[in-house]
Image: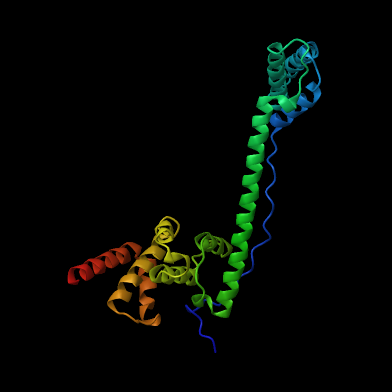
Amino acid sequence: MTRMWPPGGGTRRPLAPRVAAPREPVDPARIGRRVVRRRAKGMDAAAVAAALEEAGFDARQASRYEDLAGDVRGPAELAEWERIDQLLAAATAGTAYDPDTDDVVRVELAAEAAAAAAREAELREAMRIAARADELQALRELGTLEQTEPRDGDEAVRDELTCRAGGHVQADVDAWLAHALAGHLGHYRDLAAREEAAGLLTPPVLAHAALLAELARLVPGADVDELAFVARLATTEPEAAGALAAFLARVEGTQA
């Protein structure tokens, strides 16, 4: 019969819902600018000046209505007509507006592409975290979580599992991470990963790991069950557990 580690680690919890793809935020002002650019394409300075005059008239009319006071698209369209009017005024006579050669448009398109790439990366990361959380849940239910080495990013997975549990601390996952951090297992073999964990894990987990590491040096080969008290101390008194770990390290250094 497989022994569960720690006790209660086999409690079944529901899987997370499917991660929704992030949508491009709606920006009325940007929509207005795009409409103006499509209309202005191929226009010369005279045609743009006429369109600007019409847009100014519409803006003055809209200002009379209170329900349009918060409108941002109208002012954005007017501002875009003004910008294009100035652009053509500075250009060679007879020049027609082309958004494909407009430096402002190019910069905006590049920024939009970067934002879209960032949203896509955020989605991929959310999907990775959700899949890894599903995997760790399955391992908990099988009672084999302690046999698994943590991976880069599992600190975020811990947060995901805590969210799934309605904000309750996941004692078994916290103990697993603390043991891995203390024993330099998985990606914690890398010093940089251990240092980064200091800003990603909670004080109780860090105190648990620190105290486990010092006790392991003082009593090599100590069984997990013998050190169960460390988790309780770190959870209830993380500062005291951290202070005790620092004290034991100082004692060991003195004896050395």
- Asked if 197 appears above or below 212 in the picture, the reply is above
- Which residue sits at x=66%, y=40%? 113
Place of residue 124 in the rendered image (x, y in percent of width and height, measured from the top left): 64, 55
Colouring scheme applied when the structure was drawn: rainbow
- In the picture, the quarter occupied by the N terminus is bottom right
- Which residue sits at x=41%, y=58%? 192
Place of residue 204 in the rendered image (x, y in percent of width and height, measured from the top left): 39, 64
Question: Left or right: 38 with respect to 105?
Answer: right
Question: Left or right: 166 with respect to 244?
Answer: right
Closer to the camera in the image, 74 or 93: 93
Place of residue 33 in the rendered image (x, y in percent of width and height, measured from the top left): 72, 27
Residue 180 position by quadrant = bottom left
Place of residue 114 in the rendered image (x, y in percent of width and height, measured from the top left): 63, 41
- Which residue sits at x=30%, y=64%? 240
Question: Left or right: 11 with respect to 207?
Answer: right
For this orientation, the residue located farthest to the bottom is: 1
For this orientation, the residue located farthest to the front is: 92
Residue 144 position by quadrant = bottom right
